[in-house]
Image (cartoon, rainbow, N blue to C red):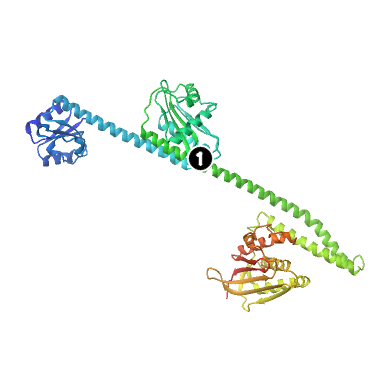
Amino acid sequence: MPRTAIIADHDAGRLASVGAVLSSAGYAVASASDQQALAKLLADQPDASIVVLDQSFAEAATTSPILLLVDLANGVKTAPGNWHGVADFIVKPPSPEELVFRADSIIRSVAARSEARHHAERLRERLRDVSAAIRTTNDPRLIADHVVNGFGKTFEADRVLFTTFEDQRVPRITAQWTRRNLPPLTEGLEGSEAAAHRLADRLWAEGDVLIVDDHSNHEWDGDDLELRDWMSGMNPRTSALIPVGEGNSSLGLIWITQLDSPRFWSRTEISMIQHVAGNVAYGLIQGHLISGQQQVLRQLQQLDQAKTDFLATVNHELRTPLTSITAYLDMIRDGSGGKLPDEVNRMLDIIVRNSERLRRLIEDMLAVSKPDYEATGLHLAPSRVGHTLRIITAALRPLAEQRQVDISLDLDRRDPDVMADEVQLEQVFTNLVSNAIKFTPRGGKISVGNTYGDDDDGNPCVIVQVTDTGVGVPEDEIPHLFTRFYRASNATSGAVPGSGLGLAIAHDIVDRHKGTMDVRSKLGEGTTIEVRLPVTGP
């Protein structure tokens, strides 16, 4: 493609001579002698190779490089940089040789800058792809592979090595890329890791990289001689060593090398590599954290499954002998073995009560040990909470009287329907009332009641409260009461029997009914447990 030149000068003779010189040098020349003609030429040829202007046309608007003709004899001593778009200037009248030389130099300089910009943009685009690939994975091995492959192809290197050091923030990884069928390195740094780590730490602290333009005459730091000897075994011509780090220390080192041809590393290229190295550090740290979390999660799942299997096995092994014990107790109490003295009957009553406690414990443990416990289907039907509370209170009143605890029932005359699994709802309130009896000392009081109100969102609900004057719960332990197998410290120290499952199971059932359960308690004064269940009708 021929070079094009636009020239403008009010002096017809100079205009003709400049045009002739440039034409003879191979330029396609267009000329103008006034501002209007120049403006038309610039509009018609916006991409002219060069524009040669007399200084009187210096304000012309063009994106092409300008060579300005100035007259120093008249005192014009202004540098070309003070005129917009002026690449250089030459004194009038220019010699033909100098004119052509200046024009050619400007064009070559502009072309070089344009090529540098395009090269930088191509590198930037390729390295953006590398960074994007790094961000798509949390696998440290894939991240390392993306780094070496991306750098190797982008910079047309012969070898790229990336290694991490011993550091709890990242896993140990060595990845490499080679071209031209070069044999891979067998063991990465092969014993030079300590020297590489020292170099990486120094570079990271200085925010710098190490560029070796020519290995044959590079002056090495004394601490890097071991690393120099390792690299010399591969006969590199030029190298770039880039630290990968985070915080105050390095995590790894990237080595990019060419074996035969020299290479100049521009500041732009180094900045891009450092940017990608920052993404690498972030990706490795995040990936390592996620991998660790996933491993912990798998271990917890395995432990949970082992716990579930253990509980299921223990429950099965306990239920069989307990069933036999209960059956024989019933036979003895029915008189199958003859009439028993009153003292023996009292002993049997104690055995029966404790076997019943053991049965309830086994049932609770069996419930939470089922793998599908949380997803167990509910058999929902319209249910009256007041009716359920009457049944439970009547069933547990003998136990309360035996412990000399007064139990009262206060029901709202309105008893709206709730959609509930009545069997599971009975289990909830049985647990709450029996707990209240268990933790209330002799002479204490328990009240069970329900009201019709609204939940926190203003929706109608049934509110059930079970209040006792028992031992209470320490305030800091209240948030843990619904945790399976958790028991309050005063219950444990007081040797009050229990498994720590009753409240956890009750809370799960209420939650699956779209309800809520809250505890208010004061140590030594008593506890109130409130259950709110959404209603389905008036």
The quadrant in which residue 18 appears is: top left
Farthest-out residue, right: 338
Q: Position of residue 532 (x, y in %)?
A: 60, 69
Q: Nearer the viewer, residue 220 or 374?
A: 220
Q: Position of residue 290 (x, y in %)?
A: 54, 45
In this view, 166 is above or below 227: below
* Badge 1 element: helix
Q: Quickly name the residue at label 1.
A: 284
Residue at coordinates 67% horizontally, 49% vertically from top-left? 305
In this view, 395 is above or below 219: below
Q: Nearer the viewer, residue 132 or 110?
A: 110
Residue at coordinates 63% horizontally, 77% vertically from top-left? 412
Q: Is residue 68 left or right of residue 204?
A: left
The quadrant in which residue 110 appears is: top left
Crowd class of label 1 (few under 14; some 14 to 19; many from 20; radius 10 Å): many
Q: Is residue 471 left or right of residue 233?
A: right
Q: Is residue 80 left or right of residue 447?
A: left
What kind of residue is marked 1? Answer: Leu
Q: Position of residue 490 (x, y in %)?
A: 70, 61
Could you tell me which quadrant the C terminus lies in? Answer: bottom right
Residue at coordinates 38% horizontally, 24% vertically from top-left? 262
Whether residue 498 is visible here, answered yes or no, is no
Whether residue 357 is visible here, answered yes or no, is yes
Q: Position of residue 222 (x, y in %)?
A: 47, 25
Q: Is residue 383 left or right of residue 346?
A: left
Residue at coordinates 22% horizontally, 31% vertically from top-left? 106
